[in-house]
Amino acid sequence: MASFDMSTLGTKGCYLTFDAASQGTLFVHWSETPIEGAIAFFAPRKNVPGFKVAARFKQNGGRSELIREMSGGTGERIKRYYSGWCQYVKLAKSFQAAFVMYAFDVLPMVDIALIDGAKESDNIVPVVVGEPVESLATMSAVGTVPHPNPCFTATTFSKEYFISTGNKEGVALPI
């Protein structure tokens, strides 16, 4: 993963941003240029029909709500925050994207892990801040938990156990 250079994909893509509006909201923000304060980015590789790309980049300035009412730091609200991260990674996979999580301090930091469905062993792929995940094509599940959290430190999980463990500590879902 670390040898892949995200800059080769340019800056056109989907940024994940946060706004305090509506008791805390994560937004996907499609843009051709970097978005200040973004907490993640993916560069789509999938050939998307022109009319769909134009709609994503131009409607509401390219910005749309992903999840809201996630502030508060405990219980269901923090689960909504973790769910937003998982939904964003799932969206990135749907666009055959390369993905990177940035360092941020406006929200609680998270640990994100993926299950590589093409592997039977050593199938846990941790997402490291600033280190791009070149491809999500073979990933079959994503989990997001509070940082630091040791629940994804093993090297091999079944998909079912990964999702069960992830949902106890945060949120996990198949992608």
Image: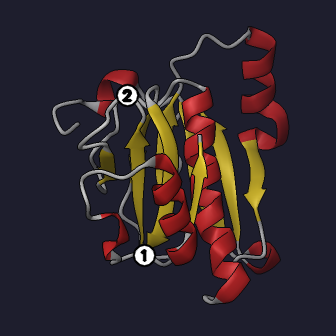
Residue located at (35% from left, 76% from top): 149
Q: Position of residue 153 (x, y in %)?
A: 26, 64
- Amino acid, disc 2: Ala
- Amino acid, disc 1: Asp
Question: Which residue carries the number 1 mark?
Answer: 105
Q: Quadrant of residue 4?
A: top left
154 displayed left or right of 18: left
Q: Nearer the viewer, residue 147 or 18?
A: 147
Q: Is residue 140 above or below residue 152?
A: above
Residue located at (63% from left, 38% from top): 91
Query: Looking at the image, do the residues carrying marks 1 and 2 touch, with CB atoms under 8 Å apart?
Result: no
Task: Look at the numbered disc 2 and give the secondary structure of its residue.
Answer: loop
Which comes sooner in the sequence, label 1 or label 2? 1
Q: Is residue 117 above or below residue 128?
A: above
Q: Is residue 38 visible?
A: no
Residue located at (23% from left, 36% from top): 1
Question: Which residue carries the number 2 mark?
Answer: 118
